[in-house]
Amino acid sequence: MSNLPFPRLSPQVMADDGDALTFCSTCAFSHACLSRGMDKSALRELHVLVEHVGPFHAGDPIFREGEPFEAIAAVRAGSVKTRVIDRDGHEHVLGFYFPGEVIGLSAIDGHRYPCDAIALDTVMLCRFSFPKISVLAARVPGIQSELFRLLSRDIGRATLLAGDWSADQRVAAFLVGMSRRLAARGFSATRFALTMARTDIANYLRLAPETVSRVLRRMQNDGLLAVDRRDVELVDLPRLDALAAPILRE
């Protein structure tokens, strides 16, 4: 593994804030607005205020299951996991969110958050009042389409792991999916830090923690990747892509 420092999803590599007219580089809605010729000043004219909130630190709740739904939030820096706790006190990890991705969309229907969102490291957010973003969506069709796309993507990710996939396929799909999501926001596609614990990864993949550790060791021995604690380098991305393809529908 390279000795170069690994990029962290933290304020040190946080997206720029743009300026009075320019969106920050990881803004979840900038593409839809820009395609309609709108800049930041147009949002102010529509009274759509974006609130920068944070920092949240590892373990801090961003919202809790059952709390009233008032806003969605885009991750500016850091990473977030969503989870539910069952009646027996067992945690079920639902997903992970990285810079440029939106949390809270699953609360739209019931008007209350259906899960917890927990910071995995130092997290900064852009908070959008949902009533105000709804007004913007009515004025800018691209925003409405983007909200639908984000909802569809969340549903798709939730169903991908429902099949009868092997442990190797599940771990490969997790790593390749994370690689693509980070690369889409300007981070490295092959070198990144796993901000979530192995137990969280195992819970999300519906595998035992020792199974995840065993698969990672085997992949490292086979030359697919290199692991140093939470730092990962995808050494042979084409082979990992091929292994993940059945789950990622390629």
Image (cartoon, helix red, strand yellow):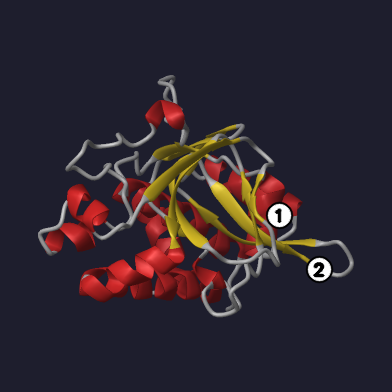
Left or right for 65, reference 122:
right
Q: Going by the picture, which residue comes out furthest to the top?
A: 3
Earlier-in-chain disc, 1 versus 2: 2
Look at mark 2 in the image and give the residue it sits on.
86
User: Where residue 88 sits: x, y (%)?
Assistant: 89, 67
**Of the pair 5 and 92, the residue shown nearer to us:** 92
Asked whether disc 1 touches disc 2, contact meaning CB atoms under 8 Å apart, the reply is: no
Front tag of 1 and 2: 2
Look at mark 1 in the image and give the residue it sits on.
211
User: Where residue 216 sits: x, y (%)?
Assistant: 60, 46
| Three-letter residue code for mark 1 | Thr
Residue 127 makes an appearance in the image: yes
Residue 214 makes an appearance in the image: no
Q: In the rendered view, would you say 165 is above or below 186?
A: below
**Of the pair 116 and 52, the residue shown nearer to us:** 52
Which residue is drawn at the image coordinates 68% and 56% (left, top)?
A: 202
Which residue is drawn at the image coordinates 35% and 52% (left, top)?
A: 49
Which residue is drawn at the image coordinates 42% and 46% (left, top)?
A: 51
Quadrant of the image occupied by residue 5: top left
Q: Secondary structure at mark 2?
A: loop
> Which quadrant is the C terminus positioned in?
bottom left
Which residue is drawn at the image coordinates 34% and 40% (left, top)?
A: 187
User: Where residue 57 sits: x, y (%)?
Assistant: 62, 35
